Image: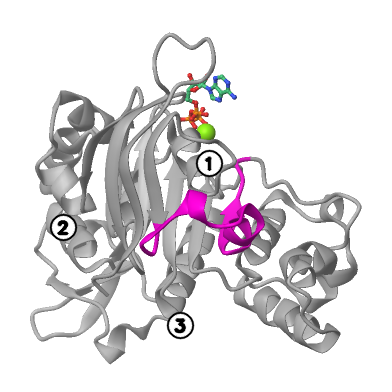
Amino acid sequence: MSKQAIVFDRVSKTFPKASKPSVNETSLEIGQGSFVTILGASGCGKTTLLKMVNRIIEPSSGTISIFGKDIRQQPLTELRRSIGYVIQQIGLFPHMTIEQNISTVPEILGWDREKIKSRVKELMELVHLPESFSKRYPHQLSGGQQQRVGIARAMAGDPEVLLMDEPFGAIDAITRGKLQDDFKQIQQQLGKTVIFVTHDVEEALKLGDKMIVMNEGTIQQYDTPLRILEQPANEFVSRLVQADDLFQRLHLIRAEDSMIALDGHDPADAGQYPRLPAGASLKDALQLILKHGVPYVVIESVNGQPLGKITMANLYSVEGG
Ligand SMILES: Nc1ncnc2c1ncn2[C@@H]1O[C@H](COP(=O)(O)OP(=O)(O)OP(=O)(O)O)[C@@H](O)[C@H]1O
Ligand SMILES: [Mg+2]
């Protein structure tokens, strides 16, 4: 697991006529199987960073390697096929059915019909889309469903690396929470390496094993979500993630007063998720969630009975004041 999947070595990108670089002297190592989220204000260089990995944008200087191999030393088509890419605006092919959209890469790779068919079926199940959608066109699906297709399509050729640019951007909070949980689970199951761009602090903290905070083309901090909250590298990071505010607020609230009911599907009883006593604070809950990278913690009574759970969404719905 210590293998490096993606390495940036002093990579810069300055667009023609630009007065300053969009990505500036960036070095970065991303381990295999790692889920890295990138957070930063609009225009700070997130998409540019991502697009350099599959050479949609060529760096002005520096080197990017994937599994030890300089990406310039691989045929472009081969490189692109080995990387799943979910673009910022979904980008499904409008005149192709869902099935055809998902099979794009397998078709190019020349898989036989039966293999493609079963791959599409498997992927649609994976992203929880009904099989009956396969003959529909993208405009006949909701935005959230289209984003699921985009994810399935990116995964179709079984790439080791997935680049995702605000993939859940246009989705309501509830569907989004579900998609996040599903996708994180899929990623962990399959051991894919993911770079995931988002504007949403909660999403970045929740999904990332590690998180990059960017500002004006420069990485401000690359660390675990918990360390970013607890030890922001500078004023910019601290303001962006608002850790002080968040911790102060959460520290004052008992987990018991903010938990939600466990439903039948929760494997809480199996003891799979970390537990906290009812009197613990929400700050304790947040720290535990981030430390273990789990979707929620279980709140238990003094005699060890599960009482409810605290999720990231709970923590972020707590009002200030
Ligand atoms: N093809 C291009 N030509 C010239 N400048 C560009 C080009 N693409 C991006 N830029 C500039 O580079 C900077 C970084 O853009 P980028 O798309 O990487 O930002 P971003 O962090 O993804 O922003 P957002 O959150 O809005 O998607 C911006 O100032 C942008 O205007
Ligand atoms: Mg962008």
Name the residue carrying label 1.
Answer: 51
Residue 40: percent from the left, percent from the top? 37, 32
Q: Amino acid at mark 1?
A: Lys
All told, the count of numbered labels is 3
Using the image as rendered, state which of residue 210 and residue 229 is in the foreground: 210
Q: Residue at x 46, y 34 (%)?
A: 59
Q: Amino acid at mark 3?
A: His
Name the residue carrying label 2.
Answer: 287
Q: Amino acid at mark 2?
A: Gln
Disc 2 from disc 1: Cα separation: 33 Å
Name the residue carrying label 3.
Answer: 265
Dot 1: element: helix
Residues shaded magenta: 66-88
Q: Residue at x 52, y 36 (%)?
A: 58
Q: Mark 2 touching mark 1, by CB under 8 A? A: no
Residue 36 sits in quarter: bottom left
Give above or below for 35 relative to 168: below
Q: Is residue 86 magenta?
A: yes
Q: Residue lying farthest front?
A: 73
Disc sitting over residue 251 in the figure = none
Tell me: 53 left or right of 259.
right
Q: Is mark 1 within 8 Å of ligand 1?
A: yes
